[in-house]
C-alpha cells in the first residue's frame, strides 16, 4: 500500500488531499499511468508531468524512480521563490 498526497492544483483537480492505493507498477510513472487510466480527473491532473514534481517518502524524486519500498508519494507543482 502506498499513501498518495496531492497538493495545490493537483489536489483541486483530483478532489482529494490523500488516498491509499495498491499498485503493481514498478515505477512512479507506472503508477501515474494507472491513476490516469482510472478517471478523467486523474488524467487531467497528470496530463503534463513536466508541470509536476514528486517526492517519495519526503525526498524529491523522479517519475522513473522505482516504487519498491516506497510508502508515501506526494505530487505537487514546482515551487517558486519569492
Image (cartoon, rainbow, N blue to C red):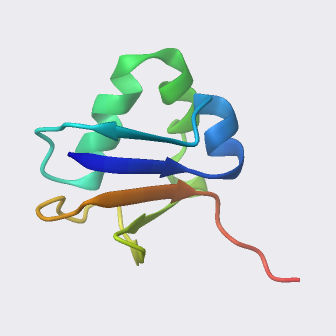
Determine the residue positioned at 54% across, 44% down.
Answer: 48
In the picture shown, does residue 28 fall above or below 48? below
| Position of the C terminus by quadrant | bottom right
| Position of the N terminus by quadrant | top left
**As rendered, which of 78 and 68 lies closer to the eye?**
68
Which of the 4 image quarters holds residue 79?
bottom right
- The image shows residue 33 at horizontal and vertical percentages of 31, 35
Determine the residue positioned at 42% across, 74% down.
Answer: 58
- The image shows residue 62 at horizontal and vertical percentages of 36, 67
In the picture shown, does residue 71 fall above or below 48? below
In this rendering, would 53 be left or right of 51? Answer: left
Determine the residue positioned at 58% across, 30% down.
Answer: 14
**Residue at the farthest top position:** 39
In this rendering, would 62 be left or right of 67? Answer: right
- The image shows residue 36 at horizontal and vertical percentages of 40, 28
- The image shows residue 74 at horizontal and vertical percentages of 46, 58
Amino acid at each position: 500500500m502506498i499513501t498518495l498526497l496531492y497538493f495545490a492544483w493537483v489536489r483541486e483537480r483530483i478532489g482529494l488531499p490523500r488516498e491509499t492505493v495498491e499498485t503493481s507498477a514498478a515505477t512512479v510513472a507506472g503508477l501515474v499511468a494507472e491513476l490516469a487510466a482510472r478517471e478523467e480527473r486523474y488524467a487531467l491532473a497528470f496530463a503534463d508531468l513536466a508541470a509536476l514534481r514528486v517526492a517519495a517518502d519526503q525526498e524529491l524524486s523522479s517519475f522513473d524512480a522505482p516504487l519498491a519500498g516506497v510508502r508515501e508519494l506526494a505530487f505537487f507543482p514546482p515551487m517558486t521563490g519569492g
